[in-house]
Amino acid sequence: MYVVCADHLEQAIDEFVDVYETPPDLYELGSVSLTDWSAPSHCTFCERAPKYLVV
Ligand SMILES: [Zn+2]
């Protein structure tokens, strides 16, 4: 699972496909409500606020 900013969305998808050999599902943070999970405060690849969830 990756939580990424807009700039790193493509990189997260590439890595996901490399690892899992299947395309990920993308969710825009804020458009989904996850009761037992709170989003990390920064992108997986940088210190910016995350915008997308790649799972
Ligand atoms: Zn980033």
Image (tube, helix red, strand yellow):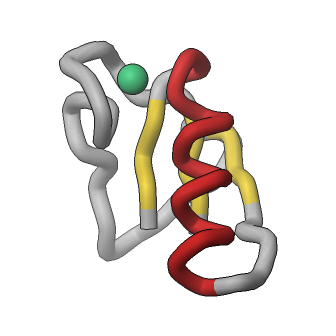
The one nearer the camera, 11 or 25, is 11
Residue drawn 41% across and 29% down? Answer: 50
Residue drawn 28% across and 55% down? Answer: 38
Left or right? Give the position of 10 relative to 49: right
Q: Is residue 45 above or below residue 13?
A: above
Q: Position of residue 27 (x, y in %)?
A: 70, 51
Q: Position of residue 10 (x, y in %)?
A: 66, 36
Ligand 1: quadrant of the figure: top left
Residue drawn 52% across and 28% down? Answer: 8
Choose top left, top right, bottom left or bottom right for residue 55: bottom right
Choose top left, top right, bottom left or bottom right for residue 36: bottom left
Left or right? Give the position of 26 relative to 44: right
Q: Position of residue 6 (x, y in %)?
A: 59, 20
Left or right? Give the position of 51 relative to 23: left
The one nearer the camera, 31 or 55, is 55
Residue drawn 30% across and 41% down? Answer: 44
Q: Is residue 1 above or below residue 41?
A: below
Q: Is residue 48 above or below residue 18?
A: above
